[in-house]
Image: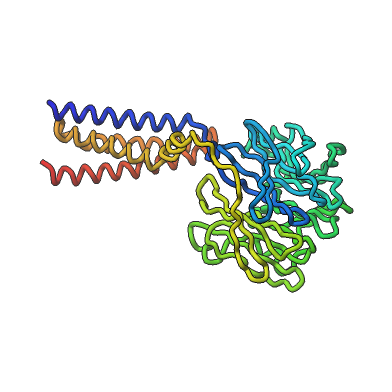
Amino acid sequence: MKRKRIFLVTIGMIFLFLAGTLLYGILREDDPYRYFTGLGEKISVAPDDSKIAFSYYVDGTESVFTANPNGTHVQKITNTNNQKDRRPAYSPDGKRLVYLREDPEGIQTLRVINQDGKKERQLTDKDMHVRDAIFSHDGKTIFFVAMEAKEFKKGEESREGFDLFSIEADGSHLKKLTNADYFSMDHLYLSSDGQTICFSEFDGGQERIYSFSLKSGTVNAKPSILPEKLENIQEFYEPTLSPDGKYLAYTEVSKESQGSSLYKYELFLLNLKTQRVQRLTDLKKAVTSPAFFHKENKIAFLENTNWPKEPAVFQLKTVDIKTQTIDALKLDIPQSAGGYHFISMLDRGVNGLTLSILYVLLMGLLSVYLHYYYPGKAYLPSIVSFSLAIITFLASFAVAAMIDPWFGIGLGMLAAAIFGCSVVVGLFVFIFRRFVK
């Protein structure tokens, strides 16, 4: 009787752990950046190379900072509560920054602020969701990518897309420049003469560079800055033009990772005159956000050392264009205030692997218990588990057809996980009954 009681207590405890873990996983806020401290996803270099602007998280709060190129004299520019400030870009005179502020609903508004953190101005309201923004060469106008906020909230159900807009730096004269509802319009940059706005767009097959002429008001799917032979065979991720208009920096999937299950992105440099492509990094991670220095032959960029997991853990680095020497910049940046270690550890611990282990333990112990006390029913937990996997799999088709395809895919993945656990439990019971009397 004592052994039976131990079995039942252990089974009950594992069941409570499983139920509690599952409930926490469902109810918790699914945000990997909730307590994160580290760099955001974009950087900008001042026109005189004296400062680098970036966003930085401190315990989940993202703000815009500036620092000297050597990582010293870090200054917080924006202050916000329960919102996130990100994607800063310098004005041509280096005195102002345009950036985006995300509210708790995920809507990003356009803002401008002086480099010293004064005279902050909101340029767009919450009716628009802004994705990227840059200054014109004279600093009077800001060009940005946006779509209607209500359409953005619809997600995959929305029939609308992104378009290009302009607005004066004082918040006046908002103007819609395109009307094409692009799927993934982003990474804006200007031509050297300031008359053409280039942007990235996924055309369904590859990442392409499009251009918009401010003179004619038309979009060109074959921008003149690119060599014709590269337009259709080369993918350009996060392209940015050098200040003198001679080079195009971009990221691309490295050749050695193209045949693997995990793509790795490296930094490349295209000489627009000679059409020569130069690979600048071999970090075997994911390089993002290249930004040219204006006075030196260097490019600043971010390396995601946690790729492809979340949150993205970026390290700020520079590469010399001529020597390809890579230097890491150590920022004298604010650190976490602490107090979230237990919750962060709990968040990391509640995952699919933990749930699978607890599920297998529960079913395995039930099978052992039935083997000793109800010998003819030892395989019953495995049978129930297999049945649950089949029911979940069939339900995934109904949910995909009648409710949401993505929910259906999620249920299908859950069914596969339950099936895998069922196989493990079934094999365990088979081996256990052969070796244990």
Query: Quarter holding the N terminus?
Result: top left
Q: For residue 370, say whether it is visible.
A: yes
Q: Of all residues shown, which one is farthest toward the right?
A: 215
Q: Nearer the viewer, residue 108 or 164?
A: 108
Residue 376: x and y in percent read: 16, 34
Residue 405 visible at all? no
Q: Residue at x 77, y 56 (%)?
A: 48
Q: Is residue 290 left or right of residue 434?
A: right
Name the residue nearer the viewer: 201 or 31: 31
The one nearer the camera, 58 or 370, is 58
Query: Could you say where residue 223 lies in the image, as x and y percent from the top left?
Result: 78, 60
Q: Residue at x 78, y 60 (%)?
A: 243
Q: Quadrant of the C terminus?
A: top left
Q: How is the image coloured?
A: rainbow
Q: Is residue 30 above or below residue 98?
A: above
Q: How many marks?
A: 0
Q: Quadrant of residue 161?
A: top right
Residue displayed at 65% across by 44% down: 55
Q: Is residue 308 above or below residue 120?
A: below
- Left or right side of 287 for 275: right
In this rendering, would 301 be left or right of 9?
right
> Residue sitting at 19 percent across and 36 percent down?
368
Quarter assignment of residue 419 = top left
Q: Position of residue 145 (x, y in %)?
A: 74, 44
Query: In this view, which residue lies farthest toward the front?
Result: 73
Q: Is residue 372 above or below residue 227?
A: above
Which quadrant of the figure has residue 177? top right
Instruction: Pinpoint residue 119: horizontal percent, then vertical percent.
Output: 79, 36
